[in-house]
Image: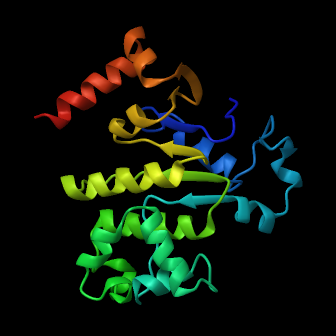
Amino acid sequence: LTIPPSQHVALVGESGSGKTTIARLIARLADPTSGRVVIGGVNLKHVANDDLRRRLTVVPQEPFLFADTIAYNLRFAKPDATDAELSFAVQRLGLEDWVNALPDGLETQVGQRGQALSAGERQMVALLRAALVSPDVLILDEATSSVDALTEVRLSRALEKLASNRTTISIALRLSTAARADRVIVLSNGKVVEDGPHAALMERAGEYRRMYDSWLAATNT
């Protein structure tokens, strides 16, 4: 599997198909037992961990938040970030309306493990963290929690801005995310079974078309 620079790739497949394993290998949270993972022509095993973390950021499915303010949690990604940098990250992802609606803006307390925020809002904090780091490669493990329509619009808008001109790998559980990606990789039993843009895979009427039609039917009931 080869992913060129600045491409947004969605990994889709049934539970256990290998989506998370591929993401973990790319992030070097695990090493392959055979073969190799290469970034920029260099085997990941030869890349210093600090260098890799500056170039690659993982947004987990359930981001951990400390019992403090949103600003404090954003600075976990970049401790020396100024207030101006935090505000710029918010503007860059188009999340001013959300921040302005919070009781104390970026100084709003998130509670223990972020429980004062919804699942979607915790994801927005995680995306803002990634925006502060501004990595070359972004890996997004999409949250399974259902979100309201407004939050989904905000998340989609923020992700689109964050992924612009950046290599992005999304573990897509909501297939609306896959439909917006440049390319969809369909996995089954640890193997790539389909690979292409959303429209082309829908025309092919294979595994992805079956998954998408089933997902669409489930979301419309």
Q: Residue 41 placed where, x, y %?
A: 85, 40
Q: Residue at x 34, y 52 (%)?
A: 144
Q: Quadrant of the C terminus?
A: top left
Q: Is residue 105 above or below residue 188?
A: below
Q: How is the image coloured?
A: rainbow
Pinpoint residue 147: horizontal percent, then vertical percent.
24, 56
Q: Quadrant of residue 217?
A: top left
Q: Residue at x 45, y 15 (%)?
A: 200
Q: Which residue is at a point 39% across and 65% down the rendered structure image?
A: 124
- Horizontal and vertical percent for residue 89? 49, 70
In the image, residue 77 sits, relative to residue 53, either above or below, namely below
Residue 66 seen in the current view: yes
Quadrant of residue 109 in the image?
bottom left
Residue at 42 percent of width and 38 percent of height: 15
How many numbered circles does the render carry? 0
Looking at the rendered image, the quarter that the N terminus falls into is top right
Q: Position of residue 150 (x, y in %)?
A: 21, 57
Query: 48 or 92: nearer the eye?
Result: 92
The quarter of the displayed image where residue 122 is located = bottom left
Task: Please name whichever residue, 56 or 131, is drawn nearer the observer in this view of the structure.
Answer: 131
Can you name the residue that lies furthest to the top here? Answer: 204
Q: Is residue 186 left or right of residue 153?
A: right
